[in-house]
Amino acid sequence: MTNSKRRKGLAVVSALLGGVLVLSACSGGGDNASGSGDGDTSQAKVDEAAAKKTSEAQIKITPEDGTDNASINNSAAVTVSKGTLTEVTMTTAEGAAVEGEISADKTSWKPSAQLERSTTYKVTATAKDSKGLEAHENASFTTVSPDNSFLGYFTPEDGSTVGVGMPVSINFDKAISNKAGVQKGITVSTTSGQEVVCHWFNDQRMDCRPDEYWQEGSTVTLKMALDGVEGADGVYGVQEKTVTFKIGRNQISYVDAKTKQMKVTQDGKTVKTIPISAGSPENKTYEGIMVMSEKFKETRMNGATVGFTDDDGKGEYDIKDVPHAIRLSTSGTFIHGNYWGSDSIFGSVNTSHGCVGLNDTKGANDKGTAGYWFYNNSIVGDVVVVENTGDKTIAPDNGLNGWNMDWAQWKAGSAV
């Protein structure tokens, strides 16, 4: 190739390359100058098309994804705005299904039962908007652990009928340092209009009662709104519960250890007088106001369980079938039937280890005995007043016996 031909070839190549470069530069410049409108319009159309394919339904799952220490009561829920729910599934981390129900208007869902503590749950929800476009949402959360929560075990039971002396008694499974906060989450009211005050016996027990015995025939309501209430540092309540119970007839029994008689009254009138045998001079029965807390047609009583042992460490007595036993104290005071004592002791001599004995027969089936009659005419919450034993007054927290504190003392134990 001659030099002249070579120069012409290079010139052509240079021109072509220059054209490419110029064209590239012009294309860029043209987009910025006169071509921008067409480009934006195209992108807008793409965005608009995408928007038309996106559901307007907005799903919200609570607790939020990743939540720890979630409530076992009211926290789990799914709601939707600008749409309706079509499917919600909730499972444990292990895959166990949790039953739930979508509301009638299909805008919310919640589980059918209380959740378990210290459990991880997964929720998946689907909803549709008015155009039928679907939206999806997922979340996972873990409920509060037993170590970080507290429960209050209460008496009496929901729906029960009890005697006029029955307090509301709540025993917490953890020590409560924020007594005021917890007490504010608990309300006790009565249809009689009586003022009800709660009293803390210690860090784990709170009882509630009016000044005088409950009004006969009234209804008492206990509301526990403790979900999320911090009872102690890092320890939260989980209960949301309403309990109602009814107060039955006004029955109060008076045990006189001196006369060895028990007078049973209803509405202030004596309905029966029963001979009794109270605690012996060596083992006197506590004095004071006592409330029936449990009833057993038959039960075992072993002296070793309440400190009555012989030289070998065995119980001074061990009776496996004590009839018609009614508990009056935590420490073991009962009023019960006695079939092993002579008929002559009732009404004449005090022989027991601290209980109040009534004449009875083995097997607890003899309707003609005093033990049978009293058992079947008594209900939990009835009051037994024990007098003239020569012993000290029973401690108010030994059983359900807070009536042994006057109203001023009782109110002084309130945290609010």
Image (cartoon, grey):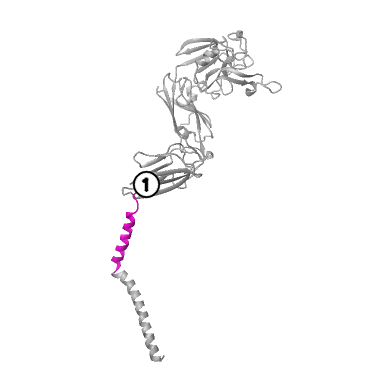
Asked if residue 406 shows in the view, the reply is yes
Q: Which residues are magenta?
A: 35-57
In this picture, residue 412 sits left or right of residue 258:
left
Question: What's under tag 1, amino acid-wise?
Answer: Ala
Is 13 rendered above or below residue 230?
Answer: below
Tell me what residue is drawn at x 33 percent, y 72 percent. Answer: 27
Disc 1 packing (10 Å; few <14; some 14–19; many ≥20): many
Q: Nearer the viewer, residue 29 or 388?
A: 29
Tell me how many marks there are.
Answer: 1
Residue 397 screen position, x and y as percent: 54, 25
In this picture, residue 53 sits left or right of residue 221:
left
Tell me what residue is drawn at x 29 percent, y 70 percent. Answer: 33
Is 295 rendered above or below residue 88?
Answer: above
Q: Nearer the viewer, residue 66 or 356?
A: 66
Asked if residue 254 shows in the view, the reply is no
Where residue 399 sits, quadrant-wise, is: top right
